[in-house]
Amino acid sequence: MNEYDKNSRVNKFEKRRKITKSITIMLLLGSIFVIFLLGMWIFGGGDDEEASDDQTEQSSDIRINDDTDSDEDTEDDANEEDTSSEEDDTSDEGNEEETTDSDEENNENNQDVVTEQAEPSDDNVIEAYTGNWQPVGTEQEGPHTTNYSDGSQDRIEIDRAAAAATGLNENEMRTYWVGNDGEQRVVATVSNGDKSESYRVFLSWIDNEGWQPTKVEVLKKLDY
């Protein structure tokens, strides 16, 4: 065997050894990497599950708290509605008491009233009658000058006297016109709430006693 062949064999052997060594190193590194990935998946996955469980528990707590707040808000709203309802009921009772008191006063004033047929003022009158109505009382003192403005004491007392003479509910009665009918005398056109009953009422002022109805006319239709 010559020197050349000997060197060729040595070189081939060295190359195989290097290749084998490289493959072994690569397999070893690959195995380590696979083991590392498995460890990350096993141990890291448990942490993720715990974190997910914690987040689920927190979400459940939040939902429970929201439900509790919602229940509290519902109870508060219910309490507010109950309070509002009680206030409305109290207000309605107060209005009913005022209406009842006014109606009772009118009924008392009308108990002893004796009416007589009278001459109608025009063709729009179904019937006319006079009566011995009493003055409704007044808060005004001293010399009297009629104030026709809406909301004045005269208008309030005129409405009260007209309701007493016609039998209408003062709180539901509508006043369409109040005008001068002579010295310390007025005439008012009124109706009930749905205008199915309309009247013309004549009144006179009595010093220190208030407005006194003197004549009532039942109208065919409102004229004002």
Image (cartoon, rainbow, N blue to C red):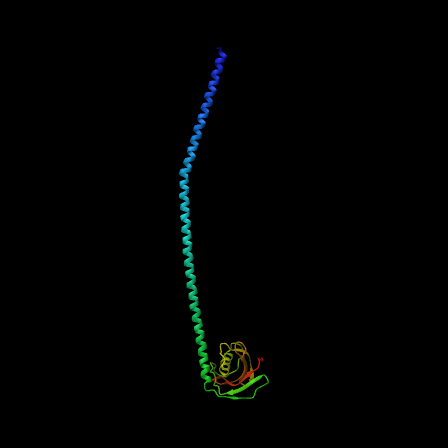
Q: Which residue is depicted at the point 42% across and 63% down?
A: 78
Q: Position of residue 181 (x, y in %)?
A: 56, 84
Residue 29 in the image: above or below residue 89: above
Image quadrant containing the C terminus: bottom right
Residue 216 in the image: above or below residue 48: below
Q: Which residue is depicted at the point 41% across and 43% down?
A: 49
Q: Toward the viewer: 39 or 174? A: 39
Q: Position of residue 148 (x, y in %)?
A: 54, 79
| Residue 182 visible in the displayed image | no
Q: Toward the viewer: 134 or 60? A: 60
The picture quadrant where one finds residue 104 is bottom left
Q: Which residue is depicted at the point 45% across and 72% down?
A: 92
Q: Position of residue 35 (x, y in %)?
A: 41, 33
Q: Toward the viewer: 163 or 139? A: 163
Q: Which residue is depicted at the point 41% across and 49% down?
A: 58
Residue closest to the far top:
2
The picture quadrant where one finds residue 196 is bottom right
Number of numbered callouts drawn? 0
